[in-house]
Amino acid sequence: MRKRVHAQCLLDRISIPLKPKVPTEIPTHSLEPAVDPIQVRSIDHQNQYDFTRHHRHSYFEVMFFEQGGGKNLIDFVEYEVKSHACYLIYPGQIHLLSRVPGSHGYLTQFQLASIASPQLLRLLQEKAWSGQGAVLFEEDQEAMRKAMPFVELIGCHAQSQAPHRRETQQHLLQAMLYALFSLTTTTKTSPAIDADFYQFLQLIDLHFKQNQTVRFYLDRLPITEKKLAALTQKLRGLSPLQIIHQRILLEAKRMLVTGNQAHKEIAYDLGFDSPASFSAFIKKKTGLTASEIQAQMTEIHKQ
């Protein structure tokens, strides 16, 4: 019988730069209190926090740029901000937007709880796992033209006192996200993730800190080792163990650049039996030491 995994693991997937010798915790910001759980704002609105420093959000953020310019740093990847573009930032990701004068657009911000559709949750999860989660479209005036009415309607209902306005916002948000995924689906887009592979990824998100062996996951999947290996090779070009290691490495980078834990603490938190084995893992996967990665990420976030 197939075991089910709760969709909450989406947040675990999505989880930032500091001077290695002077650790400072990177802040995680929540939506402003006493306002709607779904919010629409201008890109250049006055934030309640210092947006010029790297940070995380506890919520999703969909950025629509009518006029581009600048850089968008999302989880160690730097994107040039294009015009007529849309970017998706997940909860917990390291983020820093540096705009140039004249760039403008809108933000739609929302909590995971605002998504009631299991199918939409899966689409969001698959996008996160695709390795191209940040970009929904770029330099696409037609996609922008189709998306903006949803943004405007969500924003209008935020100002309304009409009955059921929050329920209306929630349905509009979900319609907007479905539309965005439809607009960005092309023949080049990866096909929907196989159900068994999807469950494998969910299990990794839930257990990667405590369990790093393929056997642990096979015992919880309704498929054989051979079938799992064939799926991971077909859909990602990697072995099951390499996919587990990918997830561990991403979390290790996040923890290293956060800077508020010693390397020894990170090693044990990620399930390594010693700091030496953690260091060896980092060196093998990246060609750099943990300290070098920490310094490298710091420089990226300074720019």
Image (cartoon, helix red, strand yellow):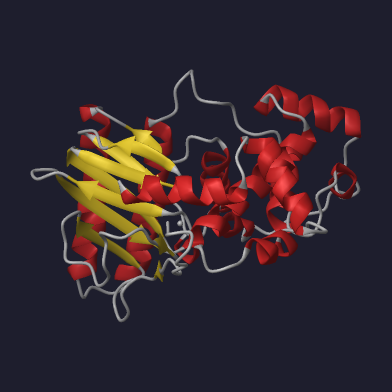
Q: Is residue 131 left or right of residue 147?
A: right
Closer to us: 85 or 6:
85
Q: Is residue 92 left or right of residue 6?
A: left
Q: Where is residue 53 in the image (x, y as percent from the top left)?
A: 30, 60
Query: Does 286 appear above or below 268?
Result: above
Residue furthest top as drawn? 187
At x 29%, y 48%, the residue is 63
Q: Which of the 4 image quadrants contains residue 162?
A: bottom left
At x 70%, y 37%, the residue is 284
Q: Where is residue 158 in the image (x, y as percent from the top left)?
A: 23, 67
Q: Is residue 153 left or right of residue 225?
A: left
Residue 128 visible? The answer is: yes
Residue furthest front as drawn? 21
At x 63%, y 35%, the residue is 287
Q: Where is residue 98 in the image (x, y as percent from the top left)?
A: 24, 48
Query: Does 251 appear above or below 48?
Result: above
Residue 199 visible? The answer is: no
Closer to us: 107 or 170:
107
